[in-house]
Image (tube, rainbow, N blue to C red):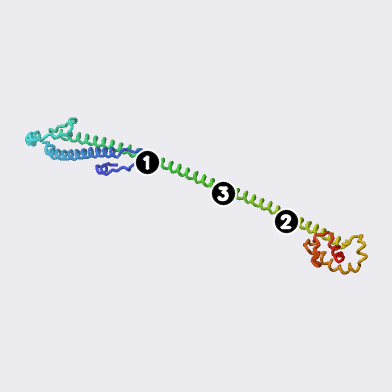
């Protein structure tokens, strides 16, 4: 691969985010390489011009090797001696002075070899440096890519773990809520069942109490009715006066029938309402008082 001056000038490196080279240092080095290459190319052009000039001046003596051309060659030697010396390089070392045509060709070859060796050496150094920079840039890019992949995998793993943890928490809360709801539902149904049983027991007790109360009241009232039906209001041993005055007894029967309910109800003045005699209404024998009212 041939590296030209334009290739060096137009070479651009990609920017590395991490573990890369300083951009300014790389640019300065590229500028130095560009300057050296430009100097080498300029020297090569000068050397080529000198080679062409030396070939043009050295072709005349080389073309007349016969004895007849010796005077002409002797005439041309002072002119060739007066020609300016050609230097291969501006540096103090490797200084070569051209005096004759034969020496000029040897010097030109030497200058070309030196320039070629120097150019090849600089080119090899630049190529090696560029390869090293490329390898380092590639290594840095691979490292950055690996770190990016590692970071991405780590973020993905953390995100997946977080999502799984959230899902597990949500599932646990849902199951806990379902258990709480089921427990509360069971408790409420149990309480309602107990209340229903209590209400049912209470209703049965009330019904039994009502039935017993009705039965007892019915028996009591029936007993009272039986007592009233079988009993007699008159005493077993009536006084003799009742036997002596049957007519008075028969005449006083309607009045006694009217005063008897009043005495049973507890009304004041029921016994004295018919005769106005002022007898007390709280007598224990209101019927007897009614029968004896005419005799008083």
Residue 217, image quadrant: bottom right
Of badges 1 and 2, the one in the foreground is 2
Q: How many discs appear?
A: 3
Mark linked to residue 26:
none
Location of mark 2 (residue): 203
Give the SS element for disc 3: helix
Locate residue 92, reporting x and y percent. 17, 30
Mark 1 in CB contact with mark 3 (< 8 angstroms): no
Q: Is residue 166 visible?
A: yes
Comes first in the chain, label 1 or label 3: 1
Location of mark 1 (residue): 141
Location of mark 3 (residue): 174
Closer to us: 1 or 227: 227
Residue 151, image quadrant: top left
Comes first in the chain, label 2 or label 3: 3
Locate residue 110, reporting x and y percent. 20, 34
Give the SS element for disc 1: helix
Q: Is residue 278 above or below residue 114?
A: below
Of badges 2 and 3, the one in the foreground is 2
Closer to us: 280 or 213: 280
- Residue sitting at x 16%, y 32%: 96
């Amino acid at each position: 691969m041939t590296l030209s001056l334009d290739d060096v000038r137009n070479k651009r490196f990609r920017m590395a985010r991490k573990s890369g080279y300083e951009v300014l240092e790389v640019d300065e080095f590229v500028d130095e390489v560009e300057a050296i290459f430009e100097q080498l190319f300029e020297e090569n052009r000068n050397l080529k011009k000198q080679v062409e000039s030396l070939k043009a001046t050295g072709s005349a003596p080389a073309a007349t090797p016969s004895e007849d051309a010796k005077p002409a060659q002797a005439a041309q030697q002072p002119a060739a001696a007066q020609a300016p010396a050609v230097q291969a390089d501006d540096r103090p070392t490797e200084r070569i002075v051209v005096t004759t045509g034969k020496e000029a060709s040897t010097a030109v070859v030497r200058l070309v070899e030196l320039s070629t060796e120097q150019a090849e050496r600089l080119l090899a150094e630049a190529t090696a440096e560029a390869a090293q920079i490329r390898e380092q840039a590639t290594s840095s890019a691979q490292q950055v890519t690996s770190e990016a992949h590692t970071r991405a995998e780590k973020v993905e793993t953390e995100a997946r773990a977080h999502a799984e943890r959230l899902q597990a928490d949500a599932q646990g809360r849902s199951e806990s809520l379902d258990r709480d709801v089921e427990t509360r539902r069971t408790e409420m149904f149990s309480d309602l069942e107990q209340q229903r049983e209590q209400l049912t027991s209470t209703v049965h007790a009330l019904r039994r109490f009502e039935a017993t109360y009705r039965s007892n009241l019915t028996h009591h009232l029936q007993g009272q009715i039986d007592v009233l039906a079988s009993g007699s209001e008159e005493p077993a041993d009536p006084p003799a006066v009742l036997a002596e005055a049957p007519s008075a007894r028969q005449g006083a029967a309607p009045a006694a029938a009217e005063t008897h309910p009043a005495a049973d109800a507890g009304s004041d003045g029921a016994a004295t309402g018919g005769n106005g005699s002022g007898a007390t209404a709280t007598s224990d024998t209101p019927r007897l008082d009614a029968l004896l009212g005419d005799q008083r």
